[in-house]
Image: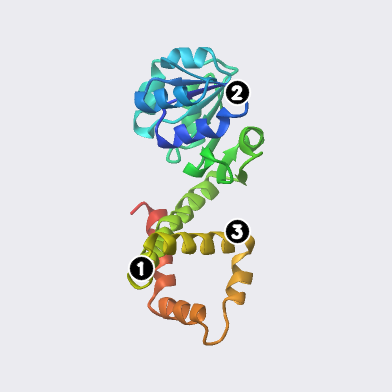
Amino acid sequence: MRIGIIGTGTIASAVVQGMAGDGHDIAVSRRSAAQSERLAAMHANVTIHDNQAVLDRSDVIFLGLMAGVAGDVLGSLALRADHKVISLMADCALGKVAQMIAPAQAAAIMIPFPGIAQGGSPIMGYGDTDLLQTLFGGRNTIFALKSEDDLAAYSCAQAVLSPAVRMVADAADWLGSRAGDRAQGEAFLRALVGSSLIGSDCATLLSALDTPGGYNQRLRNHMTGSGMSETLAEGLGRLERGE
């Protein structure tokens, strides 16, 4: 495919890396010049152009812009009716994207994570998820959402990643202070948590970790008794309300 990227921030750059090995002709904009130059140096099929040239030489367009500036950037550009546009802007509804890019087609909103660069990452998508599957489904898992309300809820819930990582980091600090090799301790905990969650649904895993009087049960009971579950639900509710 002929693919264009308008805006090359951290996530858009990871998207480019996740596609670059598939033989696409990828044009990236000069915005975030350091990122664009790095991508072009890494991949022979990635070239740098001004924004209009990116559009002119592409059929599928990714918008890696901040929602607050997207209107101004796109307002000076001419898109074609046959352009299929995939927005990476989680905080901009697909209908609003459609207004900014007319007469092009607002195909989908896609919320990737940095792991898309290597593959094996979840991708949230709303709209033409068949197109997302074609582009990324070979190495990643596409979670096709039915509505923008679902997308908003998933966007809130995915924020559990940061506190989960913080918890592992804090446990690694504790382990390093006692066992002496913090790096090895963190590597162990990352492998333990990651492989366990990948290999089992939560209910089955919690049941397996519920040995009466065992370390896992005792620590979980301590933390839930301290209000962990209620605090999490409260935090997600605040995100949903925009607080």
Q: Quadrant of the N terminus?
A: top right
Query: Does 204 sit left or right of 80 as displayed?
Result: right
Residue 198 is marked as: 3
Q: Is residue 217 visible?
A: yes
- The residues tagged by marks 2 and 1 sit, at their Cα atoms, a distance apart of 47 Å
Q: Is residue 113 visible?
A: no
Residue 180 is marked as: 1
Residue depicted at x 66% and y 39% = 138
Whole-percent x and y of residue 101? Answer: 48, 23
Cβ atoms under marks 2 and 3 closer than 8 Å: no
Q: Mark 3 or mark 1, which is nearer to you?
A: 1
- Among all residues in the image, which is located at the extreme front? 180
State the residue position of label 2: 24
Q: Who comes first in sequence, dot 3 or dot 1? A: 1
Classify residue 67 by image quadrant.
top left
Question: Compared to 194, does 15 lie above or below?
Answer: above
Q: Secondary structure at mark 2?
A: loop
Residue depicted at x 48% and y 30% = 97
